Amino acid sequence: MYPFTFTKAAGIREAIDAGRRGGRYIAGGTTLVDLMRETVERPETLIDIAALPLGEVTVTGRGTLRIGALVRMAEAAAHPKVRTTYPVISQALELSASAQLRNMATIGGNIMQRTRCTYFRDVSAACNKRRPGSGCAALQGINRSHAILGTSDRCVATHPSDVAVAFAALEATVHLLGPDGQRTVTFADFLLQPGTTPEREQNLRPGELITAVEIPAHPRPLKSGYLKVRDRQSYEFALTSAAVALQVRAGVIREAKVAVGGVGTVPWKLPAVERHLIGQRPSDSLWIAAAALAADGARPLTHNRFKVELLKRTVERQLRVVGGSA
Ligand code: SF4
């Protein structure tokens, strides 16, 4: 590990001032410390934000759910409002990492976590994300766990978060505070596809701090859930996953929200699947037809072609779990 300066921020304004000067924010530290030990990350200054007042889950009068950036994963998963209104969020969190990590890691840190591409974490390997212009060892290497959607010829790494998939499905917004004031971006615009600049992963300006993630209110309740498919049933990242939320009224699907993980360079929303579902009556044939659209645009690599079919089956199964069989 390289030497660095560590400061504790006494307040939000002080943290942002330090962030503007180039410091890196740290809260749970469950990703950043690992990467520093491996010398993948070499920040000169860490700003400990763990004591800032951003650790509440609240519900506004109109029903918007606001999860503070410093709420721990375990706290968010167990919160009664999250559990009852958006089980897809609780399930995604509880299927992530390990109990110890969920007790430390924060919601803000979770969506900021960096890829698990093994070449990214091996400082001797070519990696455009870690060292722009150095190449991508995964393209010709072992790419079984890599992405099939949203890739570029510079980077094919997946985004590892589970709860980010649930947030993408529910069309969450990310609230930011920085030197120039507050800003809100949609979740779809917050995490960036690699394109020609895979080293740039989030829509963040210098010094900006995530303050909260908000889930918009839904006038009528959604039924939701998260399915994660992985090589082992604990402490493993997704090969594929599906976050599904449906509102069915009078036997007809009125709202459909679907996003998938483990397959995209960012959590991947499936608008074609959603459009196919809305206005239809739940049935096995509907789930199969909608799920058939899930991998549209996929560009599989040498070792991850299996993800195309696995993705369709994951979506089909989770639509059936949430929507029921007719
Ligand atoms: Fe680096 Fe992305 Fe290639 Fe992995 S897939 S080696 S993160 S450039």
Image (cartoon, rainbow, N blue to C red):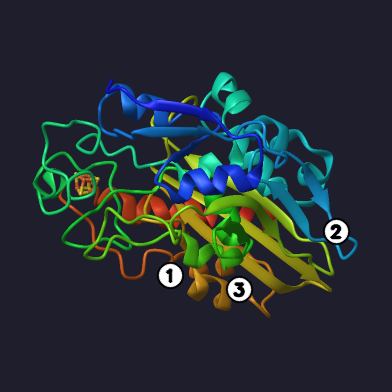
Instruction: From the viewer's perspective, tell me whether residue 217 is left or right of residue 186.
Output: right
Give the labeled residue for mark 2. Answer: 60
Quadrant location of the C terminus in the rendered image: bottom right
Quadrant location of the N terminus in the rendered image: top left
Mark 3–mark 1 Cα distance, whole angstroms, equals 11 Å
Quarter of the image where one finds residue 204: bottom left
Q: Position of residue 83 (x, y in %)?
A: 77, 42
Q: Position of residue 274 (x, y in %)?
A: 57, 72
Sequence-first disc among 3 and 2: 2
Query: Which residue shows up at 12% across the image and 43% down it?
Result: 137
Sequence-first disc among 2 and 1: 2
- Where 195 sits versus 139, above or below? below
Give the labeled residue for mark 1. Answer: 293
Q: Amino acid at mark 3?
A: Leu
Nearer to us: label 2 or label 1: 2
Quarter of the image where one finds residue 287: bottom right
Q: Is residue 176 visible?
A: yes
Residues packed near mark 3 inside 10 Å, few (<14), some (14 to 19) or many (20 plus): many
Q: Nearer the viewer, residue 244 or 211?
A: 211
Quarter of the image where one finds residue 105: top right
